[in-house]
Image (tube, helix red, strand yellow):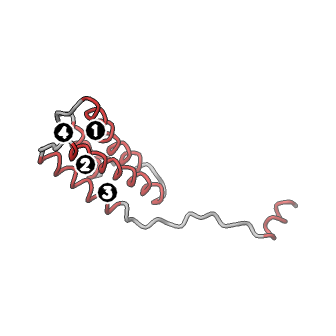
């Protein structure tokens, strides 16, 4: 399952790459959390039954991608491999977040349904 999920595989590679980037300790820790969050949210999304739930986790992963981008940007990190992996993840997740979600709205009970429930 996860071995066939391209975004997850790229996120693992990106996480490993992030561990090699030299940053101040507080940003290194933040980058580790954000980059692992991408992979963890993608993994969790694969176990969700509805597209609405999956898109919710894809959106969280995309937020973590943006956080990683910001860290690399503010520290002016010159790592073309990390930036390429991040761009790939961003593009895939942007598309995944566009997946239409099914209408999961629970129908309201009618007055007749409510009366039947009381019987």
Discs 1, 2 touching: Cβ within 8 Å? no
Callout in the foreground (2, 3): 2
**Dot placed on the residue nearer the N-terminal end, 4 or 1:** 4
Image quadrant assignment for residue 22: top left
Residue drawn 37% across and 45% down?
A: 43
Q: CA distance from mark 1 to mark 2?
A: 9 Å
Callout in the foreground (1, 3): 1
**Dot placed on the residue nearer the N-terminal end, 4 or 3:** 4
- Please determine whether, in this image, residue 78 is positioned above or below residue 91: above
Mark 1 — residue? 31
Image coordinates of residue 6 in percent, x first then y, are: 26, 52
The residue tagged with tag 3: helix, strand or loop?
A: helix
Front position in the image: 91 or 77 = 77
The numbered disc on residue 93 is: 3
Q: CA distance from mark 2 to mark 3?
A: 14 Å
Q: CA distance from mark 4 to mark 3?
A: 19 Å
Mark 4 — residue? 17
The residue tagged with tag 4: helix, strand or loop?
A: helix
Q: CA distance from mark 4 to mark 1?
A: 11 Å
**Dot placed on the residue nearer the N-terminal end, 1 or 3:** 1
Mark 2 — residue? 69
Residue found farthest to the top? 25
**Dot placed on the residue nearer the N-terminal end, 2 or 4:** 4
Q: CA distance from mark 2 to mark 4?
A: 14 Å
Front position in the image: 119 or 110 = 110
Residue drawn 25% across and 48% down?
A: 69
Callout in the foreground (2, 4): 2
The residue tagged with tag 1: helix, strand or loop?
A: helix
**Dot placed on the residue nearer the N-terminal end, 1 or 2:** 1
């Amino acid at each position: 399952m996860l071995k066939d999920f391209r975004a997850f595989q790229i996120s693992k590679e990106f996480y490993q790459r992030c561990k090699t980037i030299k940053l101040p300790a507080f940003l290194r820790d933040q980058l580790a959390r954000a980059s692992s969050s991408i992979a963890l949210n993608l993994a969790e999304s694969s176990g969700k039954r509805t597209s609405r739930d999956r898109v919710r986790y894809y959106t969280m992963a995309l937020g973590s991608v943006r956080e990683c981008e910001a860290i690399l940007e503010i520290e002016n990190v010159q790592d073309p491999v990390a930036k390429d992996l991040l761009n790939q993840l961003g593009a895939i997740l942007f598309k995944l977040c566009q997946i239409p979600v099914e209408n999961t709205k629970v129908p309201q009970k009618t007055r007749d349904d409510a009366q039947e429930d009381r019987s």
